[in-house]
Image: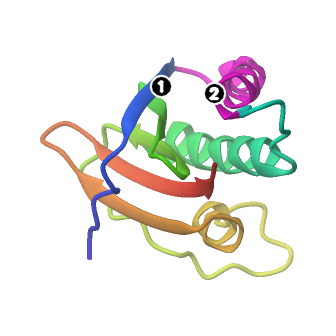
């Protein structure tokens, strides 16, 4: 069942058309997380790495299986970062794939669920969105 993300403010957004753009997304997303996450000189520990990992997995899946462009949005609440990854294929529903150890794919949602606080998905009139939240 679809579940919308918690209310959050948009910090940054990236539009991707090809897998080659994932490298730039990773660098830009890491910089944004550092810029918005530092409070009184504190480090974010592993959070940027986890967000970048999930963004890469979900965006790769959207680019491979969805309809471009893939839209990656970084949002924030008072205590969480939210990652929202959208594609324009409204004919499919996100679901955990039956994965086998030798499979090369199908782990994006499973990975997201294992390293984030919460994961959900929802559809708009134009997009199918998967979101994940992380401690801020």
Residue that carries the numbered disc 2 in the rendered image: 36
Distance of label 1 from label 2 (alpha carbons): 8 Å
Q: Is residue 15 above or below residue 45?
A: above
Q: Camera-side residue: 110 or 115?
A: 115
6 to the left or right of 117: left
| Residue pictured at 69% horizontal, 73% vertical | 114
Q: In the drawing, what numbered circle is on residue 103?
A: none
Q: In the drawing, what numbered circle is on residue 11?
A: 1
| Residue pictured at 54% horizontal, 36% vertical | 63
Q: How many marks?
A: 2
Q: Residue furthest left?
A: 125
Where does the magenta region start and end? 17-37
Q: Residues within 10 Å of mark 1 (few under 14, many from 20)?
A: some
Q: Camera-side residue: 126 or 36?
A: 36
Query: In terms of image quadrants, where is residue 10?
Result: top left
Image coordinates of residue 5 in percent, x first then y, are 34, 56
Query: In terms of image quadrants, where is residue 38?
Result: top right
Image coordinates of residue 18 in percent, x first then y, are 59, 22
Report whether residue 102 is seen: yes
Image coordinates of residue 105 in percent, x first then y, are 70, 61
Q: Is residue 115 above or below residue 38?
A: below
125 to the left or right of 73: left
Image coordinates of residue 52 in percent, x first then y, are 73, 41
Q: Camera-side residue: 25 or 133?
A: 133
- Of the two numbered discs 1 and 2 in the rendering, the one whose residue sits closer to the viewer: 2
Q: Secondary structure at mark 2?
A: helix
Is residue 30 magenta-colored? yes
Query: In terms of image quadrants, where is residue 9?
Result: top left
Lower position in the chain sequence, tag 1 or tag 2 = 1
Circle 1/circle 2 CB separation < 8 Å: yes
Q: Name the main secondary structure of what is drawn in magenta.
A: helix
Q: Residue furthest front?
A: 40
């Amino acid at each position: 069942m679809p579940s919308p993300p918690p209310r959050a403010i948009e910090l940054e957004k990236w539009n991707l058309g090809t897998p080659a753009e994932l490298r730039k997304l990773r660098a830009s997303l890491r910089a944004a997380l550092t810029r918005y996450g530092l409070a009184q000189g504190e480090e974010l520990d592993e959070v940027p790495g986890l967000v970048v990992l999930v963004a890469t997995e979900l965006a790769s899946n959207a680019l491979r299986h969805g309809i471009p462009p893939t839209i990656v949005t970084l949002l924030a609440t008072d205590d969480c970062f939210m990652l929202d990854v959208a594609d324009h294929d409204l004919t499919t529903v996100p679901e955990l794939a039956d994965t086998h150890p030798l499979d090369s794919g199908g782990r994006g949602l499973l990975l997201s669920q294992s390293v984030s606080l919460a994961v959900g998905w929802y559809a708009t009139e134009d997009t199918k969105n998967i979101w994940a939240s992380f401690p801020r």
